[in-house]
Amino acid sequence: MRTSNPFLSRWDGASDAGRTAARTGRPVGTTVGGRPADDYTTNPYAPGADTSLRTSGTAVTMDDVVVRTATTLGTVILTAVLSWLLLPVDEANIGRSYGLATGAALVAFVLAMIQSFKRTPAPALILGYAAFEGVFLGVLSSTVSTYIAPGVVVQAVLGTFAVSAGVLIAYRMRWIRVTQRFAGFVGAAATGFVLLLFADLLFSAFGAGDGLGFHSGGLGILFGLVGVVLGAAFLALDFKQVEDAVAYGAPREEAWLAAFGLTTTLVWIYLEVLRVLSLFNSDN
């Protein structure tokens, strides 16, 4: 299994597992080289999988993943703080700030899509995505804090940490088992979620008032909670990616791909938590 969430473009584990079993005559779930294969035979790092996805370079370690993830998230946080301070959303500057934030969001999306379709991670693309995404998040967070609910940004950050910690504990305790069926379900649910979101935006853009109602009221809060749950599921997929890469000695550059996946997922969770808290506070 391999992912750079939230795009799921690299999830080809089922076909890898089938090819591995066919070549080796060994059913999925048997032990390979002393390592537990029931979870790992469906990922591109496993023995017998596509060797073009592996190199003979230095193997990735958990420290590599932690350092790259800290660097990427640190870039997001730094640019978010700077944009909050340097791009005010007061009456005199709100137009300029919104324009720059929108442009940054589009650039971040393009960079993320380019990386999601590349076979190898590109640190420049990943850090560029993080920088532009931070600009967007800074202006958005400042706007929400100024005009909707003061203090909600701190709550959203704490909520994001709480969700992440909860998923990590559940994953480490094996309360969540990431299988190909789990990945397929998450992919289908995410596709439906995004399609509904775009439909809501289209209805709003063409004069249907509140669109489908997903950005206001109780339905909006429910939709946001679904987004948080999807983000938590993506985070479990990212943890699986990291575990697989370390277990099978993937090349060190894969740490950047893990950092990219974790960062995009945490941004997703933060935005959905911010949406839920903003709607809840506005209703009150």
Image (tube, grey):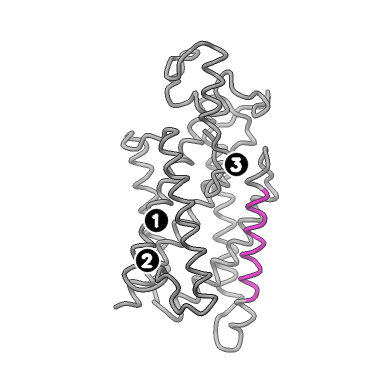
The residue where tag 2 is placed is 276
Quick check: marks 1 and 3 in contact, CB under 8 Å?
Answer: no
Residue 226: which quarter of the image? bottom left
Mark 1 belongs to which amino acid?
A: Val
Outermost bottom residue: 92
Badge 1 element = helix
The tag on residue 171 is none
Q: Quadrant of the C terminus?
A: bottom left
Few, some or many C-alpha atoms within 10 Å of disc 2 (few <14, some 14-19, many ≥20)?
many
The tag on residue 257 is 3
Badge 2 element = helix
Residue at coordinates 66% horizontally, 57% vertically from top-left?
A: 110
Q: Which residues are drawn in magenta?
A: 99-114
Q: Position of residue 237 (x, y in %)?
A: 46, 40
Residue 159 falls within the magenta-colored stretch: no
Q: How many labels, in total?
A: 3
